[in-house]
Image: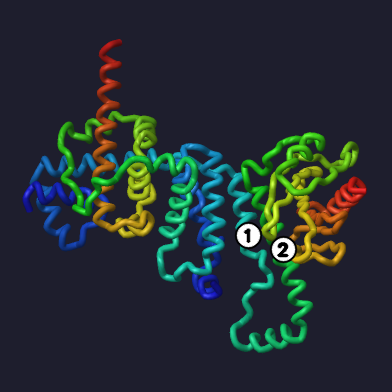
């Protein structure tokens, strides 16, 4: 810990810049402000205790997110969220992008709120990987470290998550259009 | 590259995961294939939209402050673990330790215990649910502990004292369960811990003491088989005043 602190900055210096993003991620996972605060607090305290064993030169951000995610998975709401099976998951690389209505037209008409609603409705496994990739802008390697899965699984899960999101967005658009027609 | 090959790499492409070599093959195809280019554009737009929609929740300033204070106090708490320069001071530190090992051990145990209790106090302050029984009425709080603790204790009448009871929770220290009571005085919060004083489980076999560490004022004393601790960032005079009220209540 002495080396980590002297050469790599204090825990506070490393952790606090991530605080707002960690909270955002925690809130997306828990869908509740109070639970998100408890989750971030527990994550920071666990990370602080384990800071001595943190390997200098490894990815601090991925380490923090991994602790947060593991803490969430062992929480009451996290346990509820893991009932969805990922048995059919294989390291088969990314799947081809589904084609159809040009998404540029679809997405242009989507409200941010709709996207948030779709993200909320995704399974935690899909939601977290999309957030880590698109919101946290983590590399596949960082996501693999955070989720403790191989890079091939990152790619295939991300692809399936995005497909599920596209389908939900498409459904939302159809519902919005039919509401407009019925008026 | 064929369209199928390109589509299988569209997501790594929008995620900036393709190598320079792959990009050199990839981008000419996109420039010449409207269909693949439209798919790539769709993915990019969805990624941008997700990024904008995903930054949605912000921690409250109060929560940030609490966490900063919590991390800061915990980072600094174990003052006995402050690292000295490695070699030169190691011998000196060893000599000092050898010369005063008994005193040091006693102080270290007390420091550790104080730190652990301070941690519990800070954790309660940082929690959104600092107490399990919320009441300002001692006749509600005290009975709540019945059946949860192997002992009972008395709480003082606080009227006109400036102190307010906020509630309590069961706390664990040195493998024993005890009571953590939360009081407020002005804007300060005070934790009172009460544990059974059993031989061996408390590093406070010696009577009464008061100390100040990391801006926390603490008092501890033993009364009728119970060990009391008061910890707060309130002025030492407030901590002492509450200790007097608790001692009087125990008589």
Q: Which mark is residue A161?
A: none
In this rendering, position of residue B72 left or right of residue B23:
right
Who's the residue at 50% across and 56% down the image?
Answer: A17
Whole-angstrom CA distance, mark 2 to mark 1, is 18 Å
Relative side of B213 to B60, left or right: right
The residue at the point 26 percent across, 53 percent down is A153
Q: Chain of mark 1?
A: B
User: Is residue B28 depicted above or below B86 in this figure?
Assistant: above
Question: To which chain does the residue with label 2 belong?
Answer: B
Q: Residue at x 55, y 61 (%)?
A: A48
Residue on which disc 1 sits = B72
State which tag comes first along the sequence, 2 or 1: 1
User: What x and y, as percent, mark residue B64?
Assistant: 58, 48
**Mark 2 neighbour density, 10 Å: few (under 14) some (14–19) many (20 or more):** some
How many C-alpha atoms fall within 10 Å of the one at disc 1: few (<14), some, or many (≥20)? few
Decide: marks 2, 1 in contact (CB < 8 A)? no
Q: Disc count in the image?
A: 2
């Amino acid at each position: 810990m002495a080396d980590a602190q002297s050469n790599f900055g204090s825990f506070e210096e490393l952790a606090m810049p991530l605080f707002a993003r960690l909270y955002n991620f925690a809130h997306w996972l828990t869908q509740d402000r109070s639970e998100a605060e408890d989750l971030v607090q527990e994550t920071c305290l666990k990370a602080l205790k384990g800071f001595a064993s943190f390997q200098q030169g490894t990815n601090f951000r991925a380490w923090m997110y991994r602790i947060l995610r593991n803490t969430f998975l062992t929480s009451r709401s996290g346990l509820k969220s893991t009932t969805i099976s990922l048995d059919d998951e294989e390291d088969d690389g990314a799947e081809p992008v589904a084609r159809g209505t040009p998404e540029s037209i679809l997405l242009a008409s989507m409200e941010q709120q709709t996207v948030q609603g779709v993200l909320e409705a995704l399974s935690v496994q899909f939601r977290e990987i999309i957030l880590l990739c698109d919101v946290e802008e983590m590399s596949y390697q960082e996501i693999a470290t955070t989720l403790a899965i191989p890079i091939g699984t990152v790619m295939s899960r991300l692809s399936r998550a995005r497909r599920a999101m596209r389908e939900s967005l498409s459904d939302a658009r159809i519902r919005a259009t039919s509401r407009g027609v019925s008026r | 590259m064929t369209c199928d090959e390109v589509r299988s790499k569209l997501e790594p492409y929008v995620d900036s995961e393709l190598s320079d070599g792959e990009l050199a093959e990839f981008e000419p195809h996109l420039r010449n294939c409207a269909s693949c280019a439209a798919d790539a554009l769709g993915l990019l737009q969805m990624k941008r939209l997700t990024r904008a929609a995903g930054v949605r929740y912000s921690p409250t300033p109060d929560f940030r402050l609490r966490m900063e204070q919590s991390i800061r106090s915990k980072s600094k708490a174990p003052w006995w673990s402050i690292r000295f320069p490695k070699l030169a001071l190691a011998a000196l530190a060893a000599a000092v330790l050898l010369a005063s090992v008994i005193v040091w051990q006693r102080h270290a145990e007390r420091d550790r215990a104080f730190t652990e209790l301070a941690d519990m106090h800070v954790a309660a302050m940082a929690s959104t649910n600092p107490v399990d029984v919320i009441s300002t009425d001692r006749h509600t709080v005290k009975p709540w502990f019945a059946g949860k603790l192997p002992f009972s204790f008395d709480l003082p009448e606080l009227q006109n004292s400036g102190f307010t009871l906020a509630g309590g929770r069961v706390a664990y220290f040195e493998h024993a369960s005890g009571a953590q009571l939360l009081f407020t005085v002005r804007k300060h919060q005070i934790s009172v811990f009460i544990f059974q004083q059993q031989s061996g489980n408390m590093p406070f076999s010696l009577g009464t003491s008061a100390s100040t560490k990391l801006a926390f004022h603490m008092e501890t004393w033993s009364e009728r088989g119970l060990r009391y601790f008061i910890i707060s960032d309130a002025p030492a005079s407030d901590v002492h005043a509450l200790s007097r009220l608790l001692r009087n209540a125990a008589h």
